[in-house]
Image: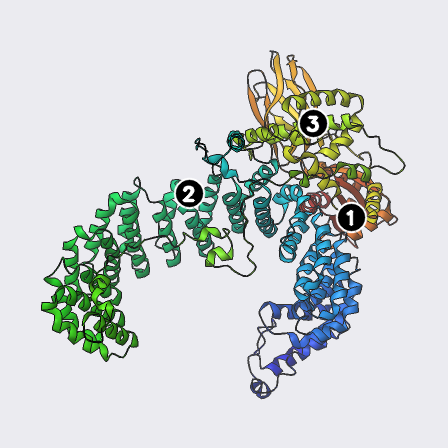
């Protein structure tokens, strides 16, 4: 290896040393000195030798160096033949790096990549999900039409893969295949339709991106998946959230009626002349009918609200545009605080956010008025940011804050940034036109700026004053005289042209000054800018028509100068003016109207915001930023007059019942029982959601109103259309029924559990049955249920945790512990036992759970109120908490008759599991499917006596509620469990190595929980 490195340095003259992570030699050999001019055919010879080596370590080192070259932007394409030979390597690490290389160069070296296509096809069957996904990425990167059928077959197989990571890559490949061969659109739509039903959050964003690229007009594919996408949105990765939110914004504009109608009061009570009595009656009925928001519309707005606090600026911007385009105007105000928060980000983010705020502030000033000071310009801001902030301040200006803003603008005018100072002067002019109360103040301020030392400030002031004077010329003769005096000192062409235009327009009001100005400019005509020359010609023509006695000869002199000017525009203007104002035999009829033409009343200019017409583009898009329609831009449609049928978003319950019926058992249909259990669940979920911090009282009130106003023709099984009284009675009956047969009720709860009352049964159906339509998939699911059979706990630790100390609880003490038993209140809940002690000498009455503050998705089943607890008495009660497979804290209030105490329950990660009984064969099979990204491991160092089987067993079951898997090897200990909420497998392996080391491996889809469990087990196993 060292000799290779030395040879490499000699060949390249040390020039490539940094590139490949080697130190340059101190001296350059004569052969190396000519390396710059000689052929570099042998430049990467040592890398090629390493790739052809028999040692995996050498190949791995070479691949790392090559990938490093690619990362630095170096060209490594000549190594393609040597790299592609290693695509069939048995070493996983080498194979991964080879695929990274091939994805980069497969498109450039298509012929060589095609030679290995059979290897890629075999890799699609590899047990490692990373290899399967990488093979699909390489295959889709070979942009050759001849392999389109192979790509299509690979995408179809990958879309049904057990790994969500592979299915995600299948969604990415769909877009590549569509761009290569658009004729495959129909077949790709079928795959997209299948992937849209996927319940994995990893896949959701990618498949929606494929949908937007391939068939954005196929809204019908979204109907059945709409509620599922809304509910999954919080858990999808950030860039997936952006794509989904933009797609759902377009969807909402086509499926719901405008929520802005509620603000439009129809007051035209007068009967139209041509309307019949029946038509008038219909119109009256329409006016009487109040606006009721569709529950699905409310679901989207509610579920995107928490994302306003995302750390990703693009997600916040996406939610902001969604609220702007589809939320009621009264609710859109909440986005302003989040957008202002983004102004602390980088200047690129600020630029985009400020552009969108500038558009919003034109239509709805009230949203951003409370944050006026956030838009004050800082000295460290870039010029583009300063100008956008000025734009927003101008839009927010009103009679109340204009005096503050004008003081701020006075400071800005003195800025060293001349472009910004000029923009400030334009801003003052706009404020003067929009707020008439300060017009004179602004004009006087601009006149004062005419004496400024900075020529650019003076020139911009002249241009703005010219526009303001056009609006009220009669009152400001003195200002025009003052500006005429400045003509000698100002050299900026635009300013000089503006002064000449003003004098020409008002030449009759300043009869003594105008001819003198013409005389001075005639002297300097030949050295003036073209823009100024044109205005001198215009001034001469106007004075010739109004004061020919004094200016006739002067005008003719100027016209003679213009006749031979180098610029053809000036020569044309000169000929035109001469024919028009100097009559002769060739003059036409127009010369009679020369005075009307030149001295006609000009309309005052409109000083408008450049962002005024951008609102027809969707906010946050490239088209909005550029103010022109970009390629691929999808326009927002107008709101429909009548909402389309909302039932298209409902999902059939019958399919679910058939799918989940165990083999050999016929499930009896009992509509009454199903109805009641659903109502109970709906009541429970609505209670928990109303207690959560993320939901405001006004929103829940609107939801209830929406539920009451639902169409009576809808199916009685739909959760959104049940009246409140019916819900209460149904819940009471269901509880009574549940006492008699709790198991069936639990099963029904599992099928009807939902986080949103408006989409109760449909979202649960989508969560439980999204990917199990084909028979093969349902068979694999039934197999996995056999594998994950819950067993009794191996060990129940007696450790208790303090819930409420007796000093804090005024004599009431509370402790809790986890009994490691299935919860009787719900399959997805963790059972918690709470022991309450009265340490006082008085009776404590009415002990109950008060307000709950639970993170989104978390649910809690509380214990029944305790009427009284005698002095020195003790009682143990049970609760159920659905922690959603996370170690988040469940906060609630433990209340007595007189006091309420805030308490928290935070579960150890090991208590979020249920032990699973499985064979060694099943364990290995499941472990093989949970490798790669789903595997975490660490090395443990401890004394040999700590690695005895009984010691390892005791330590692990003390930390985590896992089951023991029989092992045929003495040095390997296996444990299995599943998470309580989602039922995801958690496989723990302790493999004893030589000496005093062991390897701890955890395989699970829930990688976060797996990592936390690994951190907790490592110190326990290491200590004596």
Q: Position of residue 425 (x, y in %)?
A: 28, 55
Question: Whole-percent x and y of residue 141?
Answer: 68, 66
Q: CA distance from mark 1 to mark 3?
A: 46 Å
Residue at 20%, 59% in the rendered image: 452
User: Which image quadrant for residue 664?
Assistant: top right
- Mark 2 element type: loop
Q: Residue furthest right?
A: 664
Q: Is residue 530 left or right of residue 652?
A: left
Q: Earlier in the sequence, mark 1 or mark 2?
A: 2
- Mark 3 lies on residue: 679
Residue 368: x and y in percent read 41, 43
Ranked by sequence position, the earlier of labels 1 and 3 is 3
Quadrant in the picture for residue 565: bottom left
Mark 2 or 3: in front is 2
Could you tell me which quadrant the N terminus lies in? bottom right
Q: Give the vertical position of 349 relative to 564 (above or below).
A: above
Q: Nearer the viewer, residue 317 or 246?
A: 246
Q: CA distance from mark 1 to mark 2?
A: 62 Å
Q: Residue 265: image x %, image y %?
A: 45, 33
Let me know if residue 717 appears in the view. yes
Residue receiving disc 1: 990
Q: How is the image coloured?
A: rainbow
Residue highlighted by disc 2: 364
Residue 937 seen: no
Residue under the point 52% across and 60% down:
630
User: Disc 1, disc 3: CB below 8 Å?
Assistant: no
């Amino acid at each position: 290896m060292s000799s290779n490195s030395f040879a490499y340095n000699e060949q390249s003259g040390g020039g490539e040393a940094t590139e490949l992570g080697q130190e340059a030699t101190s001296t350059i050999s004569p052969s190396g000195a000519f390396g710059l001019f000689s052929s570099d055919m042998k430049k990467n010879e040592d890398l090629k030798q390493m790739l052809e080596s028999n040692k995996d370590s050498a190949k791995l080192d070479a691949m790392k160096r090559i990938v490093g070259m690619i990362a630095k932007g170096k060209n490594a394409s000549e190594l393609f033949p040597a790299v592609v030979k290693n695509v069939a390597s048995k070493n996983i690490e080498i194979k991964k790096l080879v695929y990274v290389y091939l994805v980069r160069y497969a498109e450039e070296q298509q012929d060589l990549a095609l030679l290995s296509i059979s290897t890629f096809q075999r890799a699609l069957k590899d047990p490692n999900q990373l290899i399967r996904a990488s093979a699909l990425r390489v295959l889709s990167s070979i942009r050759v039409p001849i392999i389109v059928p192979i790509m299509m077959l690979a995408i179809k197989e990958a879309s049904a893969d057990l790994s969500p990571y592979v299915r995600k890559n299948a969604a990415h490949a769909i877009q590549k295949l569509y761009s290569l061969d658009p004729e495959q659109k129909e077949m790709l739509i079928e795959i997209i339709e299948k992937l849209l039903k996927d319940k994995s959050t990893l896949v959701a964003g990618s498949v929606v991106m494929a949908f937007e690229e391939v068939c954005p007009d196929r809204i019908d594919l979204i109907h059945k998946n709409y509620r599922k996408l809304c509910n999954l949105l919080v858990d999808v990765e950030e860039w997936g959230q952006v794509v989904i939110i933009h797609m759902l914004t377009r969807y909402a504009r086509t499926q719901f009626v405008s929520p802005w109608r509620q603000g439009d009061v129809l007051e035209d009570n007068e009967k139209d002349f041509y309307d019949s009595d029946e038509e008038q009656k219909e119109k009256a009925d329409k006016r009487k009918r109040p606006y009721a928001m569709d529950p699905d519309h409310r679901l989207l707005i509610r579920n995107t609200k928490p994302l306003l606090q995302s750390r990703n600026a693009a997600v916040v911007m996406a939610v902001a545009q969604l609220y702007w385009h589809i939320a009621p105007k009264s609710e859109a105000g909440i986005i302003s605080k989040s957008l202002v928060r983004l102004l602390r980000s980088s200047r690129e983010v600020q630029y985009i956010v400020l552009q969108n705020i500038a558009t919003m502030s034109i239509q709805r000033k009230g949203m951003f008025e409370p944050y006026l000071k956030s838009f004050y310009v800082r000295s460290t801001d870039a010029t583009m940011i300063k100008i956008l902030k000025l734009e927003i301040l101008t839009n927010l200006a009103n009679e109340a804050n204009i005096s503050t803003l004008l003081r701020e603008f006075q400071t800005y005018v003195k800025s060293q940034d001349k472009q910004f100072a000029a923009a400030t002067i334009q801003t003052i002019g706009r404020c003067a036109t929009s707020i008439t109360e300060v017009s004179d103040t602004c004009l006087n301020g601009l006149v004062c700026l005419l004496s400024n030392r900075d020529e650019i400030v003076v020139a911009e002031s002249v241009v703005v004053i010219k526009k303001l004077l056009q609006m009220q010329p009669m009152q400001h003769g003195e200002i025009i005289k003052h500006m005429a005096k400045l003509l000698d000192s100002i050299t900026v062409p635009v300013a000089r042209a503006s002064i000449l235009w003003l004098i020409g327009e008002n030449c009759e009001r300043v009869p003594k000054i105008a001819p003198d100005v013409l005389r001075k400019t005639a002297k300097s005509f030949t050295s003036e800018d073209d823009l100024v020359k044109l205005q001198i010609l215009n001034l001469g023509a106007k004075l010739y028509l109004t004061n020919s006695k004094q200016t006739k000869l002067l005008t003719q002199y100027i016209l003679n100068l213009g006749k031979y000017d180098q610029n053809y525009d000036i020569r044309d203007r000169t000929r035109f003016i001469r024919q028009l104002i100097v009559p002769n035999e060739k003059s036409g009829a127009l010369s009679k109207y020369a005075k009307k033409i030149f001295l006609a009343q000009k309309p005052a200019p409109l000083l408008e915001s450049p962002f005024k017409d951008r609102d027809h583009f969707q906010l946050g898009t490239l088209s909005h930023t550029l103010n022109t329609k970009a390629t691929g831009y999808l326009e927002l449609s107008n709101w429909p007059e009548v909402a389309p049928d909302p039932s298209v978003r409902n999902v059939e319950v019958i399919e679910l019942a058939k799918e989940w019926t165990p083999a050999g058992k016929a499930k009896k249909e009992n509509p009454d029982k199903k109805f009641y259990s659903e109502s109970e669940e709906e009541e429970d979920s609505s209670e928990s959601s109303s207690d959560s911090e993320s939901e405001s009282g006004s929103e829940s009130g609107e939801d209830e109103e929406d539920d009451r106003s639902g169409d009576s023709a809808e199916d009685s099984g739909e959760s959104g259309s049940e009246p409140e009284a019916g819900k209460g009675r149904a819940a009471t009956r269901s509880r009574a029924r549940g006492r008699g047969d709790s198991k069936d009720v639990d099963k029904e709860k599992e099928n009807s559990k939902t986080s949103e009352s408006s989409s109760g049964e449909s979202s649960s159906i989508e969560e439980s049955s999204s990917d199990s339509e084909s028979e093969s998939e349902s068979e694999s699911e039934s197999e996995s249920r056999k594998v994950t059979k819950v067993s009794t706990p191996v060990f129940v630790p007696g450790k208790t945790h303090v819930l409420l100390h007796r000093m804090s609880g005024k004599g009431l003490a509370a402790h809790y512990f986890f009994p490691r038993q299935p919860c009787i209140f719900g399959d997805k809940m963790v059972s918690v036992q709470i022991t309450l002690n009265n340490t006082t000498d008085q009776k404590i009455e009415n002990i109950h759970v008060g307000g709950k503050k639970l993170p989104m998705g978390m649910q809690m089943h509380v214990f029944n109120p305790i009427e009284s607890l005698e002095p020195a008495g003790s009682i143990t009660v049970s609760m159920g908490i659905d922690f959603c497979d996370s170690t988040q804290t469940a906060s609630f209030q433990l209340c007595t008759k007189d006091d309420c105490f805030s308490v928290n329950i935070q579960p150890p990660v090991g208590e979020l599991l249920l032990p699973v009984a499985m064979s060694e064969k099943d364990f290995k099979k499941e472990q093989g499917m949970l490798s790669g990204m789903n595997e975490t491991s660490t090395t443990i160092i401890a004394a040999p006596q700590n690695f005895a089987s009984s010691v390892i067993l005791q330590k692990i079951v003390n930390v985590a509620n896992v089951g023991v898997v029989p092992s045929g090897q003495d040095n390997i200990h296996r444990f299995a469990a599943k998470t309580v909420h989602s039922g995801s497998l958690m496989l723990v392996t302790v493999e004893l190595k030589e000496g005093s080391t062991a390897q701890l491996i955890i395989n699970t889809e829930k990688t976060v929980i797996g990592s936390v469990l690994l951190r907790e087990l490592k110190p326990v196993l290491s200590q004596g």
